Amino acid sequence: MDPVTKEIFGGDFDGDTNPETGNKLIIRIDDQDVEKIHKRFAWYRTDIVPLLESWKADGIDFYTIDGEQSREAVWGEIQEILK
């Protein structure tokens, strides 16, 4: 993660600096602790999933984007959604 811009770089990123800003990348402290990772997933399941289900039930439009894709593919999906 770029500590200044908060931009996230995937595990497949090769390098230790943000190529656009030159900022040295860091590993989030909670990405190094298995217990904290489990807590983040539990929070997602208990707080976020019910919220998304509620929005769906209320007919609120939202989009899901596969974040496992390349950066370019994600950006392409975002651009399609915004059209």
Image (tube, rainbow, N blue to C red):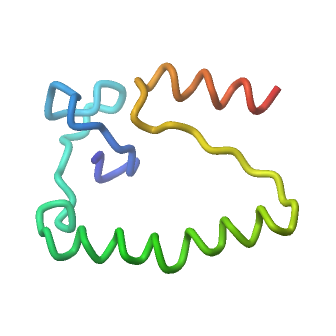
Q: How many marks?
A: 0
Q: Is residue 33 left or right of residue 55?
A: left
Q: What percent of the width, then of the height, locates residue 56?
A: 77, 62
- Quarter where residue 42 is shown: bottom left
Q: Is residue 76 left or right of residue 70?
A: right
Residue at 22 percent of width and 28 percent of height: 13
**Front-lying residue, 30 or 25:** 30
Q: What percent of the width, then of the height, locates residue 21?
A: 34, 32
Q: What percent of the width, then of the height, locates residue 36?
A: 21, 74
Residue at 26 percent of width and 31 percent of height: 22
- Quarter where residue 19 is shown: top left
In the image as oriented, which residue stretches furthest toward the right? 59
Q: What percent of the width, then of the height, locates residue 39?
A: 29, 77
Residue at 24 percent of width and 68 percent of height: 37
Q: Is residue 33 left or right of residue 44?
A: left
- Quarter where residue 64 is shown: top right
Task: Give the answer, above or below, for where 14 lies relative to 36.
Answer: above
Residue at 73 percent of width and 24 percent of height: 80
Q: Is residue 27 left or right of residue 58?
A: left
In which quadrant of the rendered image does the C terminus lie? Answer: top right
Task: Give the answer, above or below, for where 11 lies relative to 58.
Answer: above
**Front-lying residue, 15 or 49:** 49
**Front-lying residue, 25 or 51:** 51
